[in-house]
Amino acid sequence: MSHQFPPENPHAPVEELLDDTKDGAEQTASVAVARPAPPEDHALVSLDNEGPIVTRKELWAYYCDVADASSVYYNGDNGVGPLGYSMTLFQGLAQAAGYDPVAGPGSSCSAPNASGQCVLPWSGGTKAVNSIVLIANGLSFMFMTLIFTTIGSAADYGTFGRWLLLVLTVVCWAAQFGSMGLLGPAQWQAAMALYMLGFISYGATLVFYAALFPRLARNTPHSRDLRTRYERGEIDAAEYEREESLEKNRISNISTMHSNWGYLFTLLINLSVLLPLNNDPKVDNLPVFSTNAYWVILGIWWFIYQQPRPGPPLPKGEWYLTIGWKQIWQACKQYRKLPYTFLYLFSFFLLADGLNTTGTLVSICQNDLYQFSFLQNTYLGLAQAITSIISTGGFWYIQRYWKIKTKPMFVVTNVFTIFIPLWGMIGLWTNRFGFHNSWEFWAYNVVFGLFQAPYYAFSQTMMAELTPPGFDNMYFGLFGLSNRASSMIGPNVIQAIINNTGNNWDGFPFLFALCTAASLVIWFGVDVEKGRKHAVAFAREQRSAAKALPDPTDMDTKEPVA
């Protein structure tokens, strides 16, 4: 069976919420109060064994303390190294190792009379360097897909998810530190391997780290208080759902904001390295090292302060490497019970593919214009980081002040998701606009920071609201499949187009159509309120099915119940 919940007791005690400076043990030992059974139609599943109340140290270790004084894991896990610098290092070494197909082998792609094309030997022939970069991205997303589908759901059982996140984090750290050994064009293949290893493990850490967020949000002191007040009949269902949604948005937005603070801090640190050491032969490797060291120093605290919230035991006869596929199959068969959840996953699959591939294509154009300059990319990254912090805080303030629901906020960010590939498409017909000029990349990074940083926060909250409680890793694994692994399609389509035409801008029309179609489905097809009710009903149904079965240690069941 997929999840073994303990028997539900509607009269179970709720801990009295004391001062939030107390640790989890003190709060768990608080005085119990009796409450009446909640109504049958309430939009809430109270998981009886969700673990201790989230402490200040634990939440601080997730993104910051209550006073927003300092960020930790999310601040360090900001993507500057595995997404930004590692890709630039790989693309730069590949470009230096390539040759101009017009001039023939032995020529330089950066020669004054170069044709603008650059190829490398590939599978018995040649392939454009930019196509190879896109292939590396596509392969990375394919391996992410295998991770999410094979062991994603297994993270809901026992303490497997806790150890999985630790292992993936350490692998990413090792790949980043390994980049210090990349010193010349002849090592472009090693650079590709390390880039892919770092990118795959980084993408996986983001998904499994995000999967922790719904359970944390359900167990903050404020959420526990809301749950108690609702079950006592002190607030109605509408107020409970609104306030719980705002609590999820609070954690999601603040964690995203601190990821951007980490983005800013690492760029400033690297700027202090790049400027004085500009002539050092390892100048391009040092930013990767310093960025990774920053993540190690800040990221380790989550694994120290994370409180144990183990899931149910793995059913007897099941295996961690196979239960994920069984659960995905069972979940897909249940799509009629969760229509809006699966519609969102499908449409977000397309939207994330379009946005992620657009970002990769713009980065390729940017690196071509600035000749793979780490210094210039750092300046542009600073513009994006500063505007990302401002926008995430601004969007959260607007949402909190007017109590706006998650979907309208997400729709605003979608408009600019469509606008970016539309702007690149203009570059097909003119060199005056469409990512041909330096000022456009400054504008792109500012616009991306202002409107796409909140996109990540609101898309995550949308998924949290449509996820059945207690199935967080399973459905966030599918969300990761939609968000990260979806892009094994886009890069492969775009690289084929670029390889055939030799023009980077030919990829933008496909991406514009992809982003537009996906956004329209989300805007007009996904009803979050109904989807949340379906998710809660689904979770309650699974709990009822679990109670009807014997203890998992006495079972010999091979097929899980979704």
Image: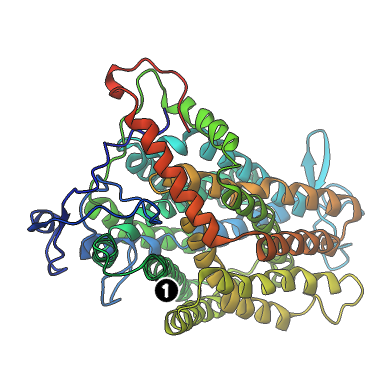
Q: Is mark 1 on a helix, strand or loop?
A: helix
Q: x%, y% of residue 2?
A: 42, 32
Look at the picture and state if 398 lies above or below 253. Answer: below
Residue at 43% of width from left, 72% of height from top? 257
308 vs 442, nearest the viewer: 308
Residue at 14% of width from left, 68% of height from top? 21
Asked if residue 482 lies left or right of residue 314, the reply is right
Residue at 51% of width from left, 63% of height from top? 80
Place residue 26 in its image quadrant.
Answer: bottom left
Asked if residue 87 lies left or right of residue 291, the reply is right
325 vs 451, nearest the viewer: 325
Q: x%, y% of residue 65?
A: 26, 70
Circle 1 packing at 10 Å, graded few (<14), some (14-19), many (20+), is many
**Residue at numbered disc 1:** 261
Q: What amino acid does circle 1 point to?
A: Trp
Look at the picture and state if 61 lies above or below 179. Answer: below
Q: x%, y% of residue 29?
A: 8, 54
13 vs 271, nearest the viewer: 13
Total labels drawn: 1
Q: x%, y% of residue 486?
A: 65, 48
Can residue 202 be seen here? The reply is no
498 vs 312, nearest the viewer: 312
Can residue 221 be seen here? The reply is yes
Place residue 49 in its image quadrant.
Answer: top left
Asked if residue 403 lies left or right of residue 439, the reply is left
